[in-house]
Image (spheres, helix red, strand yellow):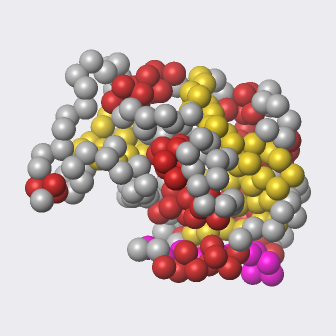
Amino acid sequence: MSRAKTPPDPPADLPENDDWELLRDLDRRNAYQLLVGGTPHSHVDLDDPTYLEYEYVRQIAHLVDLAAEERAPMRVLHLGGGGLTLPRYIAVTRPGSGQQVVEIEGRLLDFVRKALPLPRNARVRLRTGDARDVLGRVPEGAFDLTVTDVFAAARIPKHFTSTEYVALSKRALRPTGAHVVNLADGTARSGLTFTRRQVATAKQHFEHVLLLADPGILRGRKYGNLVLMASNAPLPVAELIRRAASDPFPSRVVRGQDLDDFQGGAKPMTDEDCEQSPEPPDDAF
């Protein structure tokens, strides 16, 4: 019955900016999609922060669910803010978690804070600045999870793709912590070279590395998101495989020898030769 209602409009006194906008989700009573530069960026359901529309966010949430005992708080550093979808999820499913979100566009944070308020009692600190710069200044060993989800004009800036950047993430993590990155790739023309090199880059610092992605993306048949997870502690592979297979849009977990074969001869990226992610095709969104 609630789905038949018109979702409420966002507040009228929002900071104006042509670079982002909210679209109402007509299938959910109080949900919105955030567009940044015309590109779908985040989906937020204010009534149910555990509802995750985007596949890659659900893939990351699987690891969040499995990384500690149920409802145990975690310390999480989100590099890239958007609509704060994952911080909301963690605040509700792991009460008492201490989270920091770093977003370079302070006006976007102001917009999201007003239009899409965080859940009550959410312990989420919002910081404005370049995410790599802030990452280099956080206390060593402070976090259970770092989540890199940084895009500019639908591409990952190159200074978030190097082995030096991953070293900063590793430094910020506890010994059992996990480094998680939302990647974008998958066109036949790219040959997934960017993602293969990101796998090689993560392996420079972490013993356990895996990818979660739609099989069509892994075959280079379409463009989309791939989630890279890395840790020096064993990752919950068996349960991740089960959850990935049962997702409404099933994904594949690539690890071990399959990941070595996927990487092939790809070499790690360094600050000297790093590249931004491939430009999405015209019909990607």
15 left or right, relative to 136: left
Nearer to me, 153 or 181: 181
Q: Is residue 256 magenta?
A: yes
Residue 22, x across and y down, in percent: 30, 37
Q: Is residue 259 visible?
A: yes
Q: What residue is shown at x 62% (from left), y 37% (from top)?
A: 99
Q: Is residue 111 magenta?
A: no
Residue 18 vs 245, above or below: the answer is above
Image quadrant where residue 251 sits? bottom right
Q: What residue is shown at x 34% (from left), y 43% (from top)?
A: 46
Residue 63, x across and y down, in percent: 63, 62
Image quadrant where residue 260 sits? bottom right
Q: What residue is shown at x 63% (from left), y 73% (from top)?
A: 240
Residue 165, x across and y down, in percent: 79, 41
52 left or right, relative to 208: left
Where does the magenta region start and end?
Answer: 249-259
Nearer to me, 199 or 232: 232
Q: What residue is shown at x 52% (from left), y 25% (from top)?
A: 105
Image quadrant where residue 219 sits? bottom right
191 left or right, relative to 144: left
Q: Is residue 19 visible?
A: no
Labels in figure, total:
0
Is the C terminus in the top left, top right, bottom left or bottom right quadrant? bottom left
Nearer to me, 96 or 269: 96
Nearer to me, 219 or 23: 23
Is the N terminus in the top left, top right, bottom left or bottom right quadrant? bottom left
Residue 241 vs 68, above or below: the answer is below
Residue 66, x across and y down, in percent: 64, 65
